[in-house]
Amino acid sequence: MLRIDRPGPDQAARVRAVRLRALRDAPDAFCTTAEEEERSTDADWRDRLTRPDAVTVVASLDGADVGLAVGAPHHDEAGDVGLYAVWVAPEARGAGVGEALIRAVADWARARGHAYLRLEVGDANAPAVRLYDRLGFAPTGRTSAFPPPRAHITEHERALPLRPPAPPAGGRPHGAGSAALPPPRAG
């Protein structure tokens, strides 16, 4: 059974373990390295989980932690939320874990009135690009690369609108009238 939790500061060791596993499993998916995160203190990890402007969610499948995602203020766009640190364990990929994590962060951001959920994804990470595309994240045109010595890793930004589109002049809404992730996959 899939479960999504929002761990508190008393579960900092749990979050640290999942994050370090993610960084070791997929080092080229993250700008931060495992070595950098290992230097974070216990207090640093607890502080991350008490920030009022951020959310960390952990996925567990049949009692084992298998995924992580973080929502926090976007680094460039004031008022928007960045989706960071998304990772699903290899044994849980394809089971809806990534979608559930992203939905949890999107719901949190939407409830706080944010306009967009933004992320950067590696150009070579085809499974992640497909997931984000399926969930409605559209490319923004912004591109970047990791700092040296990993400058060969390129990524692009995608954004998901969290608010309904503004009605056109005359006040009649167009389309479905709401911005939301598509319905979850069956199965």
Image: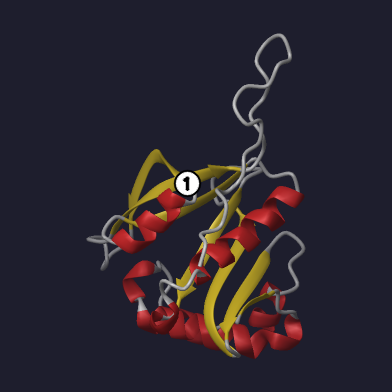
Which residue is drawn at the image coordinates 55% and 74% (left, top)?
68
**Few, some or many C-alpha atoms within 10 Å of disc 1 (few <14, some 14-19, many ≥20)?**
many
Q: Which image quadrant is residue 114 in?
A: top right
> 132 or 187, which lies in front?
187
* Position of 64 relative to 114 (above/below): below
Query: Could you tell me residue 179's position as x and y percent?
Result: 62, 39
> 171 or 70, which lies in front?
171
Which residue is drawn at the image coordinates 68% and 66% (left, top)?
55
**How many discs appear?**
1
* Position of 33 relative to 138 (above/below): below
Residue 131 seen from this side: yes
Looking at the rendered structure, the secondary structure element under dot 1 is loop
Identify residue type, mark 1: Phe
Q: Which image quadrant is residue 140 in?
A: top left
Query: Could you tell me residue 27's position as x and y percent?
Result: 35, 76
> 81 or 101, which lies in front?
101
Which residue is drawn at the image coordinates 33% and 62% (left, top)?
127
The N terminus is located in which quarter? Answer: bottom right
Q: Residue furthest front?
A: 187
The residue indicated by pointer 1 is: 137
